[in-house]
Amino acid sequence: MVPPIERPKLEGNVAVSADRQLGFAEFGDPQGRAIFWLHGTPGARRQIPAEARAYAELEKIRLIGVDRPGIGSSTPHQYPNVLAFAADLGTIADTLGIDEFAVVGLSGGGPYTLATAAAMPDRVVAAGVLGGVAPYVGPDGITSPLMNLGSTVAPVLHLAGAPIRLAAATVIKIVAPIGSPALDLYARVSPEGDRKLLGRPEFKAMFLDDLLNGSRKQLAAPFYDIIDFVRDWGFRLDEVKVPVRWWHGDRDHIVPFSHGAHAVSRLPDAEMTVLSGESHLGGLGRAEEILRTMLDIWDRERPNSR
């Protein structure tokens, strides 16, 4: 049995331009210090572990998940590069009355986390990356089999993306009734670290809730991500001046550990936490540690800003 998972305290949409909106979900304390938690690829605004939600309540954190374009209630939109996302997140922060904040990103959320930190060093107090994707092209670029595949399919997605995205959304609707056994099947073919994590009922409930809620109307965001990741991101890693803390499993089968180490070596103020024996989702099992680290940096770097 999959246990029920608590709904967000607040969900809604923010207009980020005259014809686009992004969806968001809030957990924790609405008066607390704000931390944006950016979902992976695929994922949506509710892809936040129950442990993180509970810790946010306990430590008075305003924890906010955001749908990227083409998932949940966000308008489909292809950014010209990864950096362009930062302006949208800034608009969401303005609309929600948030001045300073930290940003955490899982996997495909990592590039957008770094972009936000690069674009708004006056507002971003700290950034956390969990098994994040590294740049593919330019002076910071590093290749991998998965990113090479992404580079190959990106032109096809760009030219014929609409029917592909429609087909993907249709598949999700078909799979939805058997979502739980499908996730069990994925777990069985995953490395041991991810298999154990997905075997925990609260994580399984979170993933199912997020996937089925976020993709019930559309599933374009992962395809937009692929196109953006294999382009120039619009910024260099040495332009990220805020403190970055990076968690990466040394047995990551999706984003190689060497990619995390490569990115950390090029960031001006970054530290790596090696998740020994863990794979791609390992950072999700360290939610309290990650949020506590963001608050510790906040206390140290801006003690008068709470």
Image (cartoon, rainbow, N blue to C red):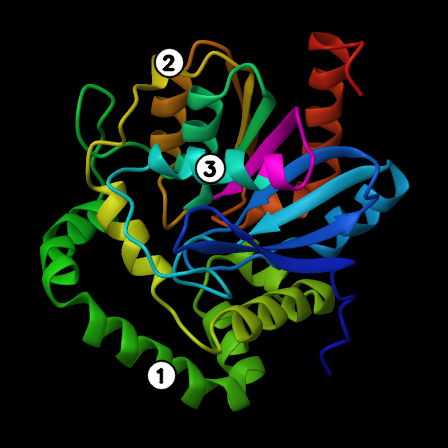
Relative side of 151 to 41, left or right: left
State the quadrant of the C terminus. top right
Label 2 crowd bin: few (<14), some (14–19), many (20+), radius 10 Å: some
Q: Amino acid at mark 3?
A: Asp
Q: Position of residue 173 (x, y in %)?
A: 44, 86
Q: Is residue 260 above or below residue 62?
A: above
Q: Secondary structure at mark 1?
A: helix
Q: Is residue 178 above or below residue 115?
A: below
Please tell me which residue lies in front, 97 or 278: 97
Q: CA distance from mark 3 to mark 1?
A: 32 Å
> Residue at the spot x=21%, y=71% of the render?
162
Label 3 crowd bin: few (<14), some (14–19), many (20+), radius 10 Å: many
> Residue at the spot x=47%, y=57% of the render?
191
Please tell me which residue lies in front, 95 or 84: 95
Pointers 3 and 2 in contact (C-beta within 8 Å): no
Q: Does 94 lie within the magenta span?
A: yes
- What range of the chain is rendered magenta? 93-107
Q: Which residue is mark 3?
A: 250
Q: Position of residue 132 (x, y in %)?
A: 43, 38
Earlier sequence position, callout 3 versus callout 2? 2
Relative side of 81 to 34, left or right: left
Q: Which residue is mark 2?
A: 239
Earlier sequence position, callout 3 versus callout 1? 1
Q: Which residue is mark 1?
A: 171
